[in-house]
Image (cartoon, rainbow, N blue to C red):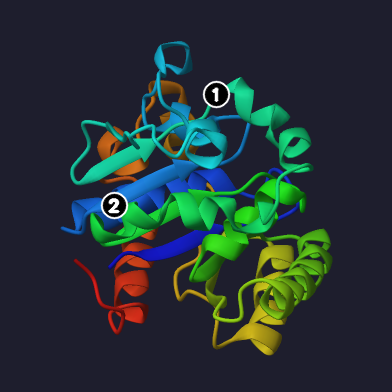
């Protein structure tokens, strides 16, 4: 059965989607069957794996709010062991539609249950906010990966997100855990980056992934080609960083039963 992992951070621009796409691709390249679900209406995770959103016929909106009788469809990205349920602009209105739904916090969890039998990992990219879509994802997830930019404002955001995760555990999903924190946009030549990394280690050493993601030109340009970094330039620093994180993720979650 798949391990369902949400990528969440209410602060935008921290490398959340970049980490979700690239860790998903790396885990797939390491031999695991992976599904990426794009639950961010911006749709950057969909673009990041080469999906043309104008051609999408089944999206995360359909998974969340569609007719139960409608067959769930995933899209093969063409990258090794990596499928996707992309998003479209329709998802932007989902929060308003969910207001009148009973058990709205559990809809994603209930609708995606058949998918858990088909994959080793399901990675879900959350919106950069703490609205109902993110609550739905966290209620459906087994655990959370938190990408965190190497700056002090991100430390404040991390504390707020930890409180939110605690509240979701209390209200909707008592099994929700934190798989780890990924440091992004790291520059070892800057004192600030090293200071922030030390602060995170001080409070969350048991959750921190060993490899920070370095700032990297190839990593920044890969989305414009619709390619995860290991397919855009597998010898780049960014690719090696994400491969290391993917290996550590598999090690951390190997106690879970997979298909």
37, above or below 121, in the image:
above
| Residue 170 position in % (x across, y down) | 72, 80
- State which quadrant residue 138 falls in: bottom right
Which residue sits at x=74%, y=38%? Answer: 95
| Residue 49 position in % (x across, y down) | 37, 32
Question: At numbered mark 1, what does the secondary structure look like: helix, strand or loop?
Answer: loop
Question: At numbered mark 2, what does the secondary structure look like: helix, strand or loop?
Answer: strand
| Residue 179 position in % (x across, y down) | 49, 75
123, above or below 159, in the image:
above
| In the foreground, 157 or 177 | 177
- For this orientation, the residue located farthest to the top is 54
Find disc 1 in the rendering and name its residue: 88
Which label lies toward us, 2 or 1? 1
Q: Is residue 64 left or right of residue 204?
A: left
Which residue sits at x=71%, y=67%? Answer: 191
33, above or below 250, in the image:
above
Find disc 2 in the rendering and name its residue: 34
Which residue sits at x=23%, y=54%? Answer: 118
């Amino acid at each position: 059965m798949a391990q369902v992992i949400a990528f969440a951070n209410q602060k935008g621009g921290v490398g959340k989607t970049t980490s979700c796409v690239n860790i998903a691709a790396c885990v797939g390249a390491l031999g695991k069957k992976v599904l990426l679900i794009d639950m961010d209406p911006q749709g950057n995770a969909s673009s990041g794996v080469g999906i043309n959103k104008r051609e999408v016929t089944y999206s995360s909106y359909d998974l969340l709010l569609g007719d139960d009788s409608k067959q769930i469809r995933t899209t093969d990205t063409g990258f090794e062991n990596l499928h996707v349920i992309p998003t479209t602009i329709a998802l932007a209105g989902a929060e308003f539609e969910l207001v009148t739904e009973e058990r709205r916090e559990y809809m994603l969890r209930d609708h995606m249950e058949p998918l858990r039998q088909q994959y080793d990992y399901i990675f879900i990219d959350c919106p950069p906010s703490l609205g109902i879509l993110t609550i739905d994802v966290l209620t459906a997830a087994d655990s959370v990966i938190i990408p965190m930019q190497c700056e002090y404002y991100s430390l404040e955001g991390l504390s707020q997100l930890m409180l939110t995760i605690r509240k979701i555990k209390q209200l909707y999903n008592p099994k929700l855990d934190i798989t780890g924190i990924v440091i992004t946009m790291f520059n070892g030549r800057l004192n600030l980056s090293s200071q922030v990394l030390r602060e995170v280690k001080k409070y969350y050493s048991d959750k921190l992934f060993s490899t920070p993601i370095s700032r990297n030109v190839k990593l920044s340009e890969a989305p414009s080609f619709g390619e995860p970094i290991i397919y855009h330039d597998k010898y780049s620093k960014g690719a090696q960083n994400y491969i290391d994180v993917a290996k550590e993720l598999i090690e951390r979650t190997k106690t879970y039963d997979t298909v």
